[in-house]
Amino acid sequence: MTAWHVRGVVLPDDEVRDLWLVGDRVTYEPVAGATTIADGGFVLPGLVDAHCHIGIAPGGAPIGSLDQARELAAVDRDAGVLAIRDAGSPYPYPELDDEPGLPRLARAGRHVAPPRRYLRDIGVEVAAADVPATVTAQARAGNGWVKLVGDWIERDAGDLAPAWDDATLAAAVDAAHAAGARIAVHTFSESAVETMVRAGVDSVEHGTGLSLDLIDVMARQGTALVPTMINIATFGNIADRARDKFPGYAKHMLALRDGFPDVVRAAYEAGVPVYVGTDAGGGISHGLAAREMLLLHERAGMPAADVLRAASWGARDWLGFPGLVEGGLADLVVYPGDPRRDLRVVEAPQRIVLRGRIVR
């Protein structure tokens, strides 16, 4: 079995260390005959995109084949993203969970969505009475996560509205946990996110409607926030398309967009676990984790070191993918400069190793 040797400043420990990669594992014990593939630079556990959709093709339709999922995942991999949480896929692909050459996958099944109020062909659309059973089924379809659509535009109201009543939203959380899965909720609005946070959801996706009170609840509970700032930046286009028919909704979306950096900053400062996610799939291109990291730093004010944690070792721990510890997984990226001093370094990884195999 080929063994690799890597030497550099290993983060987060901030020490010059030697690593040996034997198969898919890391060891700090020297391995005779190992080939040195990096000597110098800054070494991080592989990056994570914690909100990604390799089951949704560019443009928004479901992918048509496993090969298309492979191609999309490879774009993320080549940017240094070596683990993905697929936050809902209309195309099943359990065959890719352990495929060599592709990022590690934590994934939900299909989105659980309200009838005729979500993206066409993406979710399983169900009435309130069927939500718990559908959540249970989608927990089995994923490998540890369920994705719930907590709100979307209600055309009769002309604005965002919860997908179902409060009791149904809370029942979805209970059903996911009873099935042994964690549950992520898509939410833009103020009302749905309050119900879901207080019901004990595991992660809030987007979370533009969060209040300071809810942020404090999330911090106490350990509820994660995946802000997807790249996605929120598209709210202007959404508002432009909706303004003629739904002026109230358009105004609301712009207000949510404009206030969002302060929301994310408040969540970070309160101690809410924040993780990097791009919402790639459909209208957002893959391979943009570095851009999301820079937005969290430049617009939300997160220190570079904490953005790195949110994109690397912290996110990997959250998803159950051990980092560069003894016996950990052989996923790493090497950068020529210190990303804590200049976060733009993450845009150009010098060396990428996934599952003990050299990608770059």
Image: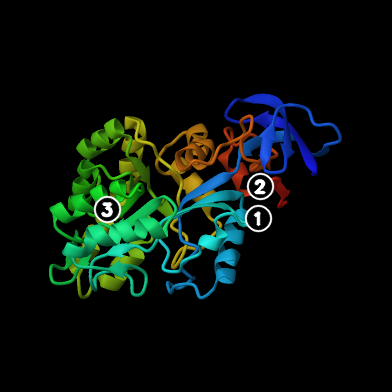
Earlier-in-chain disc, 1 versus 3: 1
Residue in the image at 71% along x and 52% along y: 359
Q: Position of residue 35 (x, y in %)?
A: 83, 39
Residue 59 in the image: above or below residue 28: below
The answer to whether 311 is drawn above or below residue 257 in the figure is: above
Residue drawn 20% across the image and 46% down it: 194
Which residue corresponds to mark 2? Answer: 355
Q: Mark 1 belongs to which amino acid?
A: Pro
Q: Residue at x 45, y 39 (%)?
A: 318
- Please provide percent x and percent y for residue 195: 18, 48
Give the crowd class for mark 2: few <14, some 14-19, many >=20 residues within 10 Å.
many
Evaluate if marks 2 and 1 touch, with contact meaning CB atoms under 8 Å apart.
yes
Q: CA distance from mark 1 to mark 3?
A: 40 Å
Instruction: Give the structural element (helix, strand or loop) at label 3.
Output: helix
- Asked whether residue 84 is in view, the answer is yes
Residue 151 visible within the image? no
* Residue receiving disc 1: 100
Label 2 secondary element: loop
- The residue under label 3 is 256
Inspect the image, locate mark 3, and give the three-letter code of the amino acid beneath it.
Answer: Leu
